Amino acid sequence: MRDLAEMFRPDGLLAEHLPGFTHRHAQEEMAQLVWDALGARRHLAIEAGTGIGKTFAYLVPVLLSGKRAVISTGTRTLQDQLYDRDLPMLGAAIGRPVDVALLKGRNNYLCWHRLDLAQQERTRGDSFQAKLADIAAWARSDSSGDLTELADLAEDDALRSTITSTADNCLGTQCAFFDDCFVLEARRRAQSADVVIVNHHLLLADLVLKDAGFGELLPGADAVIVDEAHQLPEIAQQFFGVSVGSRELQRLARDVLAEARAAGLAQELEPLTDALVKTTADSRLAAGEHTGRLPWSDCPAELRQAVLAWQERLQALGSRLEAARKIGPGLQRCWERCQDGANRLRTLQEGDPRGLRWVELSPRGLAVHWTPLDTGLELGQRIEAHGGTWIFASATLAVGDDFSLFLDRVGVPEPLTQVLPSPFNYAENSRLYLPQGLPQPNESDYVARVLSTVWPLVEASGGGAFLLFTSYRALHEAQRLLNAVPLPGPLLVQGEGPRTELLQRFRAAGDAVLLGTSSFWQGVDVRGSALRMVIIDKLPFASPGDPLIRARIERIRSEGGDPFNQFQLPQAVLALKQGVGRLIRDFDDRGMVVLCDPRLRTRSYGRVFLGALPPMPLVEDAEEALAFAAGLLPQFESQDVASVP
Ligand code: SF4
């Protein structure tokens, strides 16, 4: 049996098998912590700074322990990297292949039943049918049913939802295609593998057993590794909540109609499905111009009435399906979905006081939710019921060495905890600049003043900058202002293309300026000189205008707690760490973080934020900041500094 030292030491097996491997003390230390936790069967939460190499630090002890493990990641990219590269390489290093299964969400696998229904829909035209025939031929060949094998089927192709199943419309054991089902086959493979790679949604589906039709997904794992664990509580909140949305009901209506056509009942059922679709459209109209999130109690009375009508329509459709459901499992499943939807609407009307009822309004639809305000109790119980040792790893779990915000939300009692700082040379390669003289963030000219302050730096570094905002409003204002000035390179704006495409363009350009909010604060990895400056407009306190945030604040206050120090401040500190963490992604990366919010100096909590960041030398002098920015890409020609209107 190999041991950890043999793997990690500078001339060890990883160095032998992994090109470019460099020994890192913190990585070895983390591996030892994981190893010890697995041996002692103690849960472990570990904050591993960027660059530690946390993936290998948990994979190696898991493989050496011989325990059956589930590894849950936040992104498909990391899933693919583990499956295609890291685990085969580690198998070679330890001298025995590892039996690994990669289990993706249902929407990645062809569903034979849905394909069959679509092929019966003769109304969709020849090219549609020809496409389906090609897909059927591919699926019948030696295929795993994973749609990523179909190079010409784009990720956002609308056809995907037609030919894949959801937990709602899957017929499970009643399905005529059950024996050939790709989803089932992938799960069978997972059940017999030593290591199963999943995403957080599948992990939670397994914990909650919400994915009907197949039973437990991941039985008997001795170890569960949750990478990017900071995302787990948020996703758990969705899983433990109850929702009904207009899109779901429209999908149900479409599925009923497809089944009805196949059964020769379309004429009879179509008026009922039309009525269901119409009532969802009526409720969106009743909401008027509103978009965003609203507490149920603040919704206009017409909107609440319109949503109540959903239940009547579902019941009417369900009653008719009750008579038809014996015809086949497809109609049976549709009937069950009507029942389930009506039950959830009843639950939503009751409004359990442990959570919040709220409505999410998008330009074309709406969903009604009940969300628990505290996930800790339920998630903790489910983790204990699942069993095994749980390892939570992320670059942002703690404020200082305090993990309480995260641990309260996952509900794991008394786990081991450890913070391991990044091994990067921040002192040499980075600076943290706090500009002076900016107004308070609530001033009307704040965005313009931020831009005129930071723009000389962006010019000096020849672009290569992320400007991260805490709101779309600020982002769009910045975009408007920057449209009027010469730019060092392309201006990329969140929302003007898929995130991966914007990042590709950013990397390729080398001198681009990217304006981002929400999704660019985390999970973005731009190594090398393409990204050399991260500018953050405000401290990322969650908006108290968000009904869930407000309800949480009120809940803590009503329990005699201190919402600012227990929730708002640590949440914002962790969010800022995520944003700042975009800059230095590798040992040779150099760059500057600019934090514009003057509250960092003027408020006592500023120290908490600054103390939680990597040890970047502080710059307060504008000339010094400009000189450092200019040195970030010396091969770029210096340019005139343009002023921002
Ligand atoms: S069992 Fe479910 S996923 Fe599999 S083919 Fe049937 S409906 Fe599709």
Image (cartoon, grey):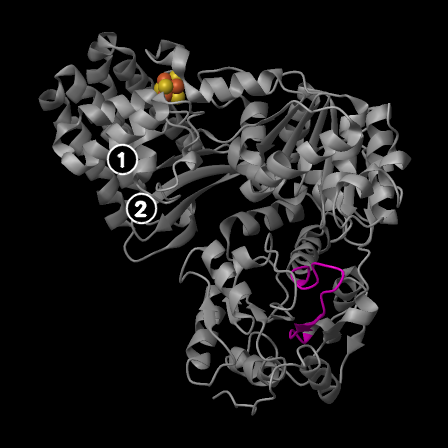
Ligand 1 contact, mark 1 (Cβ < 8 Å): no
Whether residue 588 is in magenta: the answer is: yes
Q: Are marks 2 and 1 in contact (CB under 8 Å)?
A: yes
Label 1: few (<14), some (14–19) or many (≥20) C-alpha neighbours in 10 Å? some
Position of the N terminus by quadrant: top right
- Residue 249 image point, x, y percent: 29, 33
Q: Could you tell me what secondary structure mostly forms the magenta stretch?
A: loop
Q: Quadrant of ligand 1?
A: top left
The residue identified by callout 1 is 250
- Which residue sits at x=52%, y=69%? 509
Q: Amino acid at mark 2?
A: Gly
Q: Secondary structure at mark 1?
A: helix
Numbered tag placed on residue 50 in the rendering: none
For the record, the magenta segment spans 580-598
- On the question of residue 170 being in view, the answer is no
Q: Which numbered disc, 2 or 1, marks the residue that appears first in the sequence?
A: 1
Q: Is residue 485 left or right of residue 419?
A: left
Q: Which residue is most to the bottom?
A: 640
